Amino acid sequence: MFSPQGVAQPLTVSIGGVALDPEMSVSAHMRIADARLYAAKRQGRNLTVFDFDAKAAA
């Protein structure tokens, strides 16, 4: 629970990430991370989905 000003509010966090590959563009990394973010949300929220191999994920 998140309690701003003493009022409890439900809070969820979903994170998507990808390992940096110097041969790939920033936009490619962002597309992969965004896809992983939505994968985390689809799997129930409050999750982190991370790819260690950016080329395989692209």
Image (cartoon, rainbow, N blue to C red):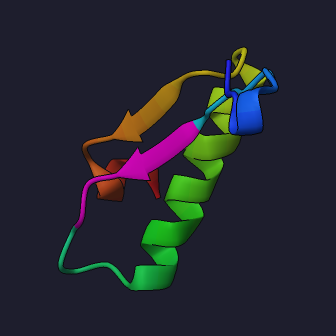
Tell me if 58 is positioned left or right of 52 in this view: right
Q: From what the image shows, is residue 16 above or below residue 20? A: above
Q: Return the residue found at the far front.
A: 6
Quadrant of res 55: bottom left
Q: From what the image shows, is residue 13 above or below residue 34? A: above
Total marks drawn? Answer: 0
The secondary structure that dominates the magenta segment is: strand
Between residue 20 and residue 47, name the one nearer to us. 47
Tell me if 22 is positioned left or right of 32 in this view: left
Image point (26%, 47%), residue name: 53
| Residue 4 is a magenta residue | no
Image point (78%, 20%), residue name: 8
Which quadrant is the N terminus positioned in? Answer: top right
Quadrant of res 7: top right
| Residue 18 is a magenta residue | yes
Across and down, in percent, residue 9 comes to 81, 25
Q: From what the image shows, is residue 56 above or below residue 28? A: above
Q: Return the residue found at the far left.
A: 22
Span shown in magenta: 15-20
Q: From what the image shows, is residue 13 above or below residue 24? A: above
Between residue 57 and residue 40, name the one nearer to us. 40
Quadrant of res 38: top right
Across and down, in percent, residue 15 comes to 53, 40
Tell me if 34 is positioned left or right of 22 in this view: right
Image point (39%, 38%), residue name: 50
Image point (48%, 74%), residue name: 28
Between residue 41 and residue 46, name the one nearer to us. 46
Across and down, in percent, residue 47 comes to 54, 23
